[in-house]
Image (tube, rainbow, N blue to C red):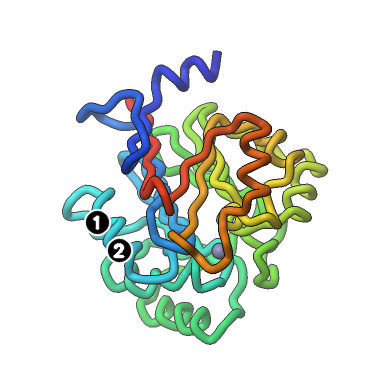
């Protein structure tokens, strides 16, 4: 029933992807997998609030935001750095220059010199910084919320596996956003019986072969998945293994390197 409702309510707008239905109506929730090249940047918004999760490697995030946000948008209520690798926060230097940031979520205060430079910039701009941990959640208004599923405690080191895992939702329609976690963390979350089930999954670590193991994909049981990877990237993301697993489980996927930006929009 839940999934039937989803098919009736959902609008997916893509660049070269597809849509079920599109019109200028009010929306409930919108999630955009931005096309930032080899990196991640995901925008979640309700009619009231905006959260940006990662900022990609460079200035592309700002041009992507300009295309999906209403003209005149000045503020991002929350900006999240899933983990302090340049392909996730590099573009935030440009984002912080263009937009006011209400609150910055980070999960470590140490990292590369560039990361620490970004934290200094945040301090200079007097952006409040927080280090949330599961099971915190915030309300984006209108019934949209974002929950922290991982880390279980704040102040982790800064490997891919320490990426924050978030679930954005409206009612029972859920988007799982996994940063760059790898197989050991995926299996830990499955074994700890964290509620991973979601209709939409941003695959971890750009579709790398080190992530997206079958027990994790089965626990999430997504209707659609998204891979954020750069065209002809040197890491060979997404891996053939990941694409094979998705094919074996019959899960469709959209790739920023082929399909460009994809927006999932839930409307009245
Ligand atoms: Zn990455």
Residue 116 x %, y %: 52, 82
State the count of labels: 2
Residue 133 on image: x %, y %: 64, 56
Q: Looking at this view, is 111 or 223 the one in front?
A: 223
Q: Is residue 30 above or below residue 108?
A: above
Label 1 lies in ligand 1 vicinity (Cβ under 8 Å): no
Task: Give the residue drawn at x 20%, y 30%.
Answer: 24
Could you classify mark 2 by the number of other residues whose Cα lies within 10 Å: few (under 14), some (14-19), or many (20 or more)? many
Q: Is residue 190 above or below residue 9?
A: below
Residue 170 placed where, x, y %?
47, 32
Locate the N terminus and report the quarter of the image it occupies.
top right
- Asked whether, in this view, residue 17 is left or right of residue 239, the answer is left
Per the image, the residue denoted by label 1 is 66
- In the picture as drawn, the residue positioned furthest to the bottom comes out as 113
Q: Nearer the viewer, residue 268 or 257?
A: 257
In the rendering, at what x and y percent does residue 55 appear? 42, 64
Disc 2 beta carbon < 8 A from ligand 1? no
Answer above or below: position of 98 versus 153: below
Element under disc 1: helix
Vertical order, 242 against 104 (above or below): above
Cα gap from disc 2 to disc 1, whole angstroms: 6 Å
- Quarter residue 196 falls in: top right
Pointers 2 and 1 in contact (C-beta within 8 Å): yes
Q: Residue at x 35, y 77 (%)?
A: 125
- The residue that disc 2 covers is 62
**Is residue 232 or residue 116 the one in the foreground?**
232
Question: Can residue 54 be seen from the camera position used here?
Answer: no
Binning the other alpha carbons within 10 Å of mark 1 as few (below 14), some (14 to 19) or many (20 upward) gives few
**Depth check, front residue: 27 or 227:** 227
Q: Quarter for ligand 1?
A: bottom right
Q: Residue furthest left?
A: 72
Q: Is 135 positioned to the left or the right of 95 in the image?
A: right
């Amino acid at each position: 029933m839940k999934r039937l409702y989803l098919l009736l309510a959902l609008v997916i707008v893509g660049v070269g992807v597809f849509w079920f239905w599109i019109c200028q109506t009010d929306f409930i929730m919108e999630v955009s997998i931005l096309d930032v090249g080899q990196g991640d940047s995901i925008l979640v918004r309700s009619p009231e609030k905006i959260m940006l999760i990662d900022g990609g490697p460079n200035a592309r995030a700002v041009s992507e935001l300009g295309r999906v946000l209403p003209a005149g948008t000045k503020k991002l209520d929350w900006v999240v750095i899933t983990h302090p690798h340049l392909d996730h926060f590099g573009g935030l230097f440009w984002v912080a220059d263009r937009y006011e940031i209400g609150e910055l979520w980070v999960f470590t205060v140490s990292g590369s010199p560039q990361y620490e430079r970004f934290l200094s910039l945040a301090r200079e701009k007097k952006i409040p910084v927080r280090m949330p941990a599961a099971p915190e959640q915030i309300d984006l208004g209108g019934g949209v919320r974002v929950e922290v599923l991982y880390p279980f405690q704040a102040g982790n080191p800064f490997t891919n596996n320490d990426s924050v895992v978030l679930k954005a939702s409206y009612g029972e329609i859920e988007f799982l956003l996994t940063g760059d976690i790898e197989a050991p963390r995926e299996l830990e979350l499955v074994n700890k019986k964290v509620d991973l089930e979601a209709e939409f999954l941003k695959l971890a670590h750009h579709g790398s072969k080190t992530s997206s193991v079958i027990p994790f994909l089965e626990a999430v049981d997504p209707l659609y998945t998204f891979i954020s990877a750069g065209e002809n990237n040197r890491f060979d993301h997404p891996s053939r293994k990941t694409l094979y697993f998705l094919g074996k489980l019959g899960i469709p996927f959209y790739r920023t390197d082929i399909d460009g930006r994809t927006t999932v929009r839930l409307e009245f």
